[in-house]
């Protein structure tokens, strides 16, 4: 078993006035730390001599406590490695802890009280976890071509900013973000996405997920209704659930979210969440007529529109679609974007373009959440953008993803033409492939994961039960070989699931 070094002497608080002997207090402390997972199997425990010196007590109680823990199987000793937390912990530790309560002078043991969570906490845990999708195999959604990222240029810029960082980079920063970075983002969005904004409206976030979460926090009260695209982005669902919102699924068709019927019936939600440039996951673009209808209705009713423009950099057949925010004349649109797809997801940098009157609230919400994003990476990315690497990387990735998408569509046609129906426009980093009627997409996804393939079930994007299952296949991070090999494994998974 791997040994984990003990880096710190644990913080043990003795009750010197208690009747419990010191060795017993030590024994109790270590036992609880192991049960609670504070000390992990294989972790080295401090030497008796070191602990005695640190706690300023004699070694005797420590030796006694260690002997007891060894005898009961919580500790084990290894020649040359000293004493460690045992690899397998005794079974009795799994039973629920009894709570000692003082009643009068005597101590009695009672059953632990309830462990109540908020309704929002429960709703969050109700969303199905898809642990089988935690692999980096072919078709993982939202994964860019990491091996094509210009890591040499990036690491030089990181080194440049780290070598002699100005005080501003190491101290607390502005909750809205590093100003030169916000200026670069505003310029980029104005030029490429026709977003109308000033740098003062840009809130830098830890990915667009945080942008959605802060938007929900600032704009929604518990039980407020939010219209969601159906199918739609599950991450947005989670963000709105954390605000206690009541989510209403609104079907999408070939023109995007179809709100005409709900408008006619006079429904008035507090907010609408949309992905108009490239609907997630189905891939259509919202029509101009629907955009105008939505904006006019929002002005009349006072609803907020949350526009998630998550991968609009990648359109292959046509020119990029301008943002909805750029058409908005009443500052109704909150526009969220991300660097996860165009750079890499672990960078955790995104942004929100906030209407001017909402800037103080968004800034305060960010301050309350986690204060601000790492200034170092904001500064590095500013240079990456300003020096032209960003535009070059996007251009290269656009060509690459176009090639990968074509390869995927062709592989599906050749190998699975009778099983999968490809949906979506020529854009982005993923496509949806519908399965034959009555084939369970979760079962296929599980089977595919056993073959190392990461194919997200389409049903995961629905609030209601979908009429037909499908798979969301990411191609950004899959090489041509992985695409062909992945499709043949997917074919076997569908066949064995029928
Ligand atoms: C539609 C959509 N919105 C938002 C995000 C969140 O991106 P991030 O939080 O990594 O910026 C994703 C990620 O996959 C996405 O697909």
Image: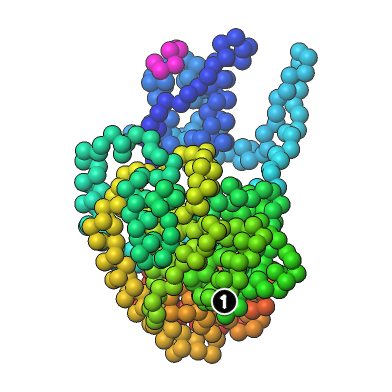
* Mark 1, residue position: 289
Q: Is residue 458 above or below residue 417?
A: above
Would residue 449 be visible to someone looking at this image? no
Along the line of sight, the residue nearer the viewer: 134 or 281: 281
Q: 105 left or right of 129?
A: right
Rendered-image quadrant of the N terminus: top left
Q: Position of residue 495 (x, y in %)?
A: 56, 83
Given residues 145 and 158, the one toward you in this image is 158
Residue 31 lies in the magenta-colored region: no
On the picture, is 305 further left or further right than 180? right
Residue name at image x 38 percent, y 32 percent: 7
Q: In the picture, residue 260 is in which quadrant?
A: bottom right
In screen coordinates, is 151 left or right of 186?
left
* Whether the residue under disc 1 has CB within 8 Å of ligand 1: no
Question: Does residue 100 show up?
Answer: yes
- What range is drawn magenta here? 53-59
Q: Compared with residue 434, is residue 34 higher up or lower down, i.e. above or below?
A: above
Q: Is residue 57 magenta?
A: yes
For image coordinates 32% across by 70% down, the residue present is: 397
Q: For this rendering, which residue is in front, 329 or 198?
A: 329
Image quadrant in which you'd find residue 475: bottom left
């Amino acid at each position: 078993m791997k040994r984990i070094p003990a880096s710190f002497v644990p913080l043990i608080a003795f009750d010197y006035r208690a009747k419990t002997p010191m060795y017993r207090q030590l024994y109790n402390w270590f036992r609880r730390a192991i049960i609670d997972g504070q000390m992990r199997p294989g972790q080295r425990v401090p030497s008796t001599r070191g602990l005695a010196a640190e706690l300023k007590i004699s070694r005797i109680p420590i030796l006694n406590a260690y002997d007891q823990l060894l005898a009961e199987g919580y500790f084990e000793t290894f020649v040359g490695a000293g004493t460690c937390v045992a690899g397998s912990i005794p079974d009795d530790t799994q039973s629920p802890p009894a709570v000692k309560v003082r009643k009068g002078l005597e101590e009695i043991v009672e059953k632990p009280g309830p462990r109540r969570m908020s309704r929002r906490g429960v709703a969050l845990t109700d969303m199905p976890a898809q642990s089988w999708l935690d692999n980096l195999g072919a078709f993982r959604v939202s994964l860019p071509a990491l091996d094509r990222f210009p890591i040499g240029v990036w690491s030089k810029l990181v080194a440049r900013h780290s070598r002699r960082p100005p005080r501003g980079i190491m101290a607390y920063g502005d909750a809205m973000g590093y100003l030169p970075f916000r200026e670069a983002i505003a310029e980029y969005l104005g030029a490429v996405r026709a977003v109308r904004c000033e740098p003062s409206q840009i809130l830098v976030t830890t990915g667009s997920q945080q942008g959605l979460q802060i938007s929900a926090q600032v704009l929604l009260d518990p039980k407020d209704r939010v219209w969601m695209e159906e199918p739609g982005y599950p991450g947005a669902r989670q963000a709105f659930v954390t605000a206690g919102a009541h989510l209403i699924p609104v079907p999408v068709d070939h023109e995007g979210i179809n709100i005409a019927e709900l408008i006619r019936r006079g429904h008035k939600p507090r907010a609408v969440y949309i992905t108009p440039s490239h609907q997630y996951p189905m891939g259509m673009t919202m029509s101009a007529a629907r955009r105008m209808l939505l904006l006019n209705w929002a002005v009349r009713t006072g609803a907020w529109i949350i526009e998630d423009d998550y991968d609009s950099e990648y359109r292959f057949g046509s020119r990029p679609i301008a943002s909805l925010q750029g058409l908005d004349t009443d500052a109704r649109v909150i526009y969220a974007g991300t660097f996860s797809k165009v750079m890499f997801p672990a960078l955790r940098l995104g942004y929100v373009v906030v209407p001017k009157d909402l800037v103080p609230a968004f800034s305060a919400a960010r301050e309350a959440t986690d204060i601000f994003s790492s200034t170092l990476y904001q500064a590095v990315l500013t240079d990456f953008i300003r020096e032209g690497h960003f535009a070059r990387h996007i251009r290269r990735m656009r060509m690459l993803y176009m090639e990968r998408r074509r390869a995927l569509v062709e592989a599906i046609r050749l190998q699975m033409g009778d099983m999968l129906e490809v949906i979506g426009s020529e854009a982005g980093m993923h496509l949806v492939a519908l399965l034959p009627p009555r084939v369970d997409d979760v079962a296929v996804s599980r089977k595919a994961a056993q073959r190392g393939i990461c194919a997200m079930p389409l049903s995961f994007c629905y609030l209601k039960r979908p009429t037909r299952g499908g798979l969301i296949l990411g191609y950004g991070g899959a090489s041509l070989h992985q695409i062909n090999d992945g499709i043949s494994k997917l074919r076997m998974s569908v066949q064995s699931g029928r």
